Amino acid sequence: MYQCVAANSLGEVQASMELTIKDSPPTLRHTFIEQTLQPGPPVSLKCTALGHPTPVITWTLDARPLEPSSGHYGGHRVGVGSWVDVEGQVVSQVNISSVDHLDGGTYTCTAMNTAGKVHHSARLNIYGQPTTRAPVNVSVVESSEATLVCPVAGYPIATVSWTLHGRPITSTSRRMPRGDRTLVIQRVEAQHDVGHYTCTASDAQGRSATATFFLSVVKPPVLAEFKFPPGLVEGMRLSMACSLLSGDLPISLRWSHNGRPLPRDPVLTVTHSQFFSNLVFADIRGRHAGKYTCTASNSAVASTVSATMHVQVPPSWVVEPQDVAVIGGEEVALECHAQGTPPPTVTWKRTTDSLLTEEASALVGDGWRVLTPRAGSLRIRDARAEDSGRYLCYAHNNVSPPISKTISLSVLEGARIEERVVNESTAVGESLVLPCPARGDLPIVFTWARDAIPVPGGGSSEMEVRLEEGGRVSVLVIPSITRAHAAVYTCQASNLYGTDSRTFFINVVERPDPPSHVHVKEVTSRHVSLAWAPPFDGNSPLTHYMLQHWPAQATPTPINTTLPQDLTEATLKDLLPGRTYHVQVLAVNARGSSLPSPTLSITTLQEPPTAPPTRLRAQANQQKAITLSWQPPASHLSPGEVTGYQVGFHEAELGEAGEYRWRSARSGVMTSEITGLRHYTAYKVTVRAVNQVGAGPPAQAVIVTTNQGVPSAPPESVKCDPLSSQALRVRWQPLPLNLSNGPVQGYKVFYKRTTNIEGSNAVEIKRTTNLETNLQGLGRFTNYSVRVLAFTAAGDGVVSQPVLCSTLQDVPGTPAAIRALASGRDSVIVSWLPPLRPNGILTHYTLYYRP
C-alpha cells in the first residue's frame, strides 16, 4: 500500500494506492541444440529461465523423469544441478561424463512456477544398436493431446512401428505415428485410447528392439469459483468453501495465501471433506488480507481457483504522540503516525480548555516557521512562548473507531538576542556606545570580550560596561576612539535555559597610510612604469590613488594623475628622453588623502634622434665621388642628443626597393664625400643623425649623377664577314649601360693585314656611330685582324679581342717568266713561274698555243 500527501499553506490532502506485483510465467533465456555423437565423450546440456516467482527446472529423457541416481543411466555418469545466478536467472545443467548409446533420446527441460510453464526439447543422438529401456506406464488427461515416446535407445533408427492390443496403429486424424519415435494422440478418449501400446524400433542392419507400456486416461479436477464478500472489517468472522465439481479420485485439496502455504494462525483453521475444503476465520485481522488459492490435484493434473480478500483495519498508533518541552529559539518536532487499511489521514490541531476537539481547526504550515513535511509530522522552527499549549493528533480512515491524543508543548525561553551581528563604523576621536539587549527569563548574565579576550565586568580605564532596563540590556561605552579600538567585540547573554550572543565588528575610520614599496618596473625614453603595495586603508575603502610627477630641473609643480583604487601600478607617458623626473603616490579614502610616498627620482632613457638633418646638398665633382653637406636637426623636433651622422646611398634605378649603404661621417663635421662609385650613375643620397642609442630618420633623399668615364668593357659579339674580294663587313653588340660609364659617342674599328704579301700591314682605323661598318679597298684573298672599342666624351674604352677574317678569292694574275724550248722534231718544252698575285688558291694552268 502506497500513500502520498500533498500540502501547502492552506492544508493538505492524502491519497493511497495498493500495488500488487503479478506473477510472470517463466521464459527460457538459454537452451541446447540437437547433437549427434559417438559413445565416450562428455556432454553438457543447459537451460536458463527467468520468471516470478523463481521457476523450478526439471528434466526428462523420452518423456521420463531424468534422475542422477537412476541406475539405468548410471548415476555415477549423469549429474543434474540447478542454481540462481546474480541476475536472478535459474540455471540448470545435465552433465554426462561419458555418453553411452542408452543416453541418447529426446531431452526436455521444463521451467515452471505458479504463473505457468515453458519447455524446450532437442535430441541427443548417440550411435548404437536399438536397445529397450525399462517400460514406464503413462497417464494422460482426458481430452488433451498425448505424445507417446517409444522407450528404445540407439542411433540411427530406420523405422518405428506401433500396435495397440497387438493391432497395428496406422495414421488417422487422431492417431499419428511420427518419424521421431513418437505417437501423437489428439483429444484422448478413455473408451478408445486406454490399453497396452507396443513400439518396435529397427535400424538399417535389421537389428530391432521392442518396448510395451500401459496408457491410462484420467479426468482432471474441476473446482467451483469462490469470492470473498466486500466490506470485511477486523473482528468479523468468515467461512469460505472450496468445492470440487468433478475429476477422477483420489483428489487432494490444499490452500495457499499469496502463493505460499497457509501459516500457523490460532484464528484461522481449515476443514476438509472428500469434495470440499472450508477456510474458517474466527477473528479476521489485517494480516489475513491477500490472495487465497485453492488447489485440487489428482494423478494427472492440478487445478486452481483464486480470490482476493480485502480487510478494512481501523487506525492504530505506529508512533504515539508524547508531551514535549523545548527551549525557545530551537526547533521542535511533534511526531504522530498511525496505520490502518485504508491508510488513515493524520492531522494536528491546536486546542484549549474552552475549545472542543471537533471545533479545533487543522494546523497548516506557513512554509517557513511552521512546517508539515509529511503526514503526522509537525515541525516548529524558532519555538516561541506563544507556541506553548495543547496539541491534538487525530487519525481516521472511515473505519471505526478513529484515534486521537492530546499532548502539551512547553517552550522554555532561554536568553535570546534578536540581532546577532552588528557592523559599526566610527572615526578616530569620536565616542562609541554598543547596546546589547536580551530576551528571556531573568536573571540574565552578560559578559563582554574584545577579540576573544574578556573585558572586566565594570570596564577599564578606556571603556565602561553598565546594565540598563532592569538587567535586560548591557551597554559598552568607549569615550574616545583610537585606531587600536578597531576589533571584534562580543556580548554574551546567559540564563538557565540558554545562551546567546551578539558580535560587534567595529571599524575605526581614518586617513589611509601612504602606499608602500613604490618602485620602478620599467623605464623607457618616453614612459615610466611604477608599482606599489596597497597601504592600510584607514578602515575605509580607498576611493582612488593620486600619482604626482614633475621635472627635476623645474619648480615643483606636480602633475596629478587619478587612478582607480583597485590599481596598484601605473605608467607615466609622454615624457621627454634623457630627463630626470620626481614621482610620488598618495592613497585617498572618504576621510581624505594620505601623506605622499617617498619621492623617487627617475631618469628616462635616451632615444635615437627623432628628426632628420636639414638643408642637405649633394654634388658630383669627380667621376666616382659625390660630396654632401647638411645642417643639424631642428632642436625642438629632436630633443635627443646627436653624437654624429651617417650618409647613405644607393643607385637611383633601384627605386623604393633600393637599400641604403651607410657610412659614418667624420665626427664634428657636417660634410662628407662618398667615393668608390660608378661612372655616370644616378645615386640617391641622404644623411641621418645618430647617437649612442641609434639612428634617427633620414633626410629627404637627393638624386645625384656621377661624371662620365671611359667605357669599362669592349663591345660584345664582334663578328667579321667577307663581302667581296676587297671588302669586309664588321658587326658588334652595344655596351650594357652599366659598363658604358656615359653616353657612347661612337665606335672605332682597328684592322690590319696578318701577312705582308702586298703592301703594308700597318693598323688602320675607321670611326662609326653604327653597330656595323664595311671595310673597303682591302687586299684580295687577304687575312685581316679586326678589333673594336667604344668611346665617350671622356675617351676611348677597352678594345675587343682580335677577330680574324679573310676577303674572297679573285682572278689570279699573269704567270711570269714563260720559256719555250724545242725538245724534238714535233715537241716543245714550256716553263713559267706562278703569278705574283695569285688572288686565291690556284687549281690549274691553261696552255694556249698556235702554229
Image (cartoon, helix red, strand yellow):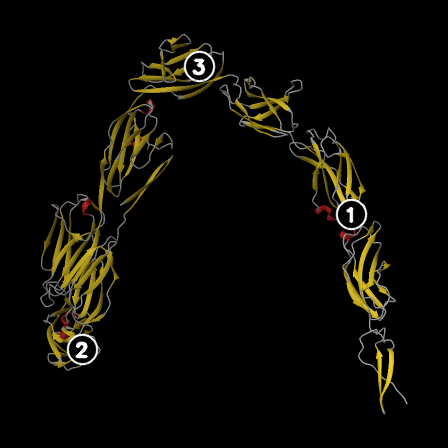
Q: Position of residue 64 (x, y in %)?
A: 14, 67
All told, the count of numbered labels is: 3
Indicate whether 219 appears above or below 295: below
- Locate residue 585: give its quadrant: top right
Residue wearing tag 1? 679
Q: Secondary structure at mark 2?
A: loop
Q: Nearer the viewer, mark 3 or mark 2?
A: 3
Q: Position of residue 822 (x, y in %)?
A: 86, 87
Q: CA distance from mark 3 to mark 2?
A: 113 Å
Label ID, residue 485: 3
- Locate residue 466: give its quadrant: top left
The kind of residue tagged 1 is His
Q: Earlier in the sequence, mark 3 or mark 2?
A: 2
Q: Secondary structure at mark 3?
A: helix
Q: Residues within 10 Å of mark 3 (few under 14, many from 20)?
A: some
Q: Nearer the viewer, mark 2 or mark 1?
A: 1
Indicate whether 581 appears above or below 108: above
Q: Position of residue 626 (x, y in %)?
A: 78, 41
- From where the camera sits, is residue 420 visible? yes
Q: Nearer the viewer, mark 3 or mark 1?
A: 1
Indicate whether 528 appears above or below 206: above
Indicate whether 660 appears above or below 668: below
Q: Residues within 10 Å of mark 1 (few under 14, many from 20)?
A: many
The kind of residue tagged 2 is Ile
- Find the residue positioned furthest to the top: 461
830 left or right, relative to 87: right
500 left or right, relative to 552: left
